[in-house]
Amino acid sequence: MAKIILLATLLIAVCHTGQTQIVSSSGQWSKDGTQLLSQIQSHLLQLQTIVSDHGHLFMDIQKKINNLSETDKHLSRNLTDQEQAMLKDIQHLQRQMVSSHAKMTNVTITLKDLSSAVSRMQKYTDQQNMFNLLLTDRINLLTKLALYSQYQTSYYYYVSSTLSWDDAANYCKKIHPQGHLATIQSQGENDFIAKLLPYGATSFLGGHDRVQENKWQWENGETFNYTNWSPGEPNNGASREHCIIMYQNNKQWNDAYCTPGNSFVCEIDS
């Protein structure tokens, strides 16, 4: 561009040069004029070439500008498309979040239902275990009752183990909640129990006077309505005989030491 300006300036300067410097007085071109004209023509050619080159350069630049403009439009379109795609992705994620929240709510409800079901099953299991224990106890009781002898509404069981009167009473209570040492309220019951004893046995019954001397009572609290003492009994020998025993051989009673031990008869009220 600077070169074009320089050549243009030179041409303007030449044009303003007087004719006397270029044309002779006879009207013919001087030698200097001819040389100057040649130079001008040469510079014009250069100027044309430069202008042509710059025209091509300008066209290239314009083309690049146009290309950049198209690229900018393309980028703008791409950016808009990306924004739209991103917006769609965000909306999709939002829908997924709403759906996930709904699913989580359903899962929470399901977990609560499962927890309630587990609690009910645990309660049922506990009840079933309790039922099984009761059934086992009933089977054990029936098994024991098979060894017991029934008289009217009670069951009786002879225990050959030798225990003190207190230990014998506790033993009978452990057999059954309604268990206690045997009580006798009639001659028939007395004879029935005597038949349970093996030959020659001496066994504890549930009577005692340990609360008040010679005031006999049954261990389970029943009224003392019947007695079958041996002759001369009870005599409270050595002032230490406070528990009732029965002799198998004569079916009669005697007051005896509560310790050491004897065999005994348990009774279970039905």
Image (spheres, grey):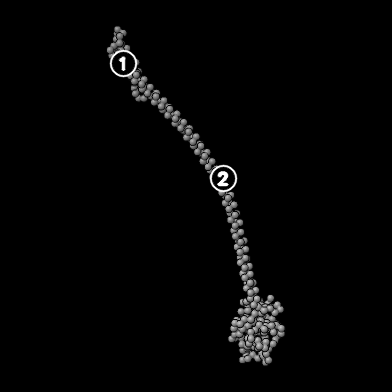
Horizontal side of 65 relative to 175 (left or right) equals left
Residue at disc 2, secondary structure: helix
Q: Which residues fall within the magenta stretch?
A: 95-99
Dot 2 amino acid type:
Arg
Q: Residues within 10 Å of mark 2 (few under 14, many from 20)?
A: few
Which quarter of the figure is the N terminus placed in? top left
Residue displayed at 64% across by 80% down? 157
Between circles 1 and 2, the one closer to the viewer is: 2
Residue displayed at 56% across by 45% down? 95
Identify the mark at residue 95; answer none if there is no mark: 2
Residue at disc 1, secondary structure: helix
Look at the numbered discs 1 and 2 and tell me whether their residues touch, using CB distance below 8 Å. no
Distance from the alpha carbon under mark 1 to that under mark 2: 84 Å
Nearest the viewer among 114 and 54 is 114
Tell me where residue 138 sits by quadrant: bottom right
* 172 vs 7: above or below: below
Residue displayed at 64% across by 86% down? 199
Residue displayed at 70% across by 79% down? 151
Nearest the viewer among 34 and 11 is 34
Tell me where residue 158 sits by quadrant: bottom right
Q: Where is residue 145? Give x, y as percent.
A: 65, 76
Q: Where is residue 250? Give x, y as percent.
A: 67, 88
Which residue appears farthest toward the top when viewing the image?
26
Magenta stretch containing residue 97, yes or no? yes
Dot 1 amino acid type:
Ser
Residue 110 visible in the picture: yes
* 80 vs 35: above or below: below
Q: Which residue is mark 1?
A: 38
Q: Nearer the N terminus, badge 1 or badge 2?
A: 1
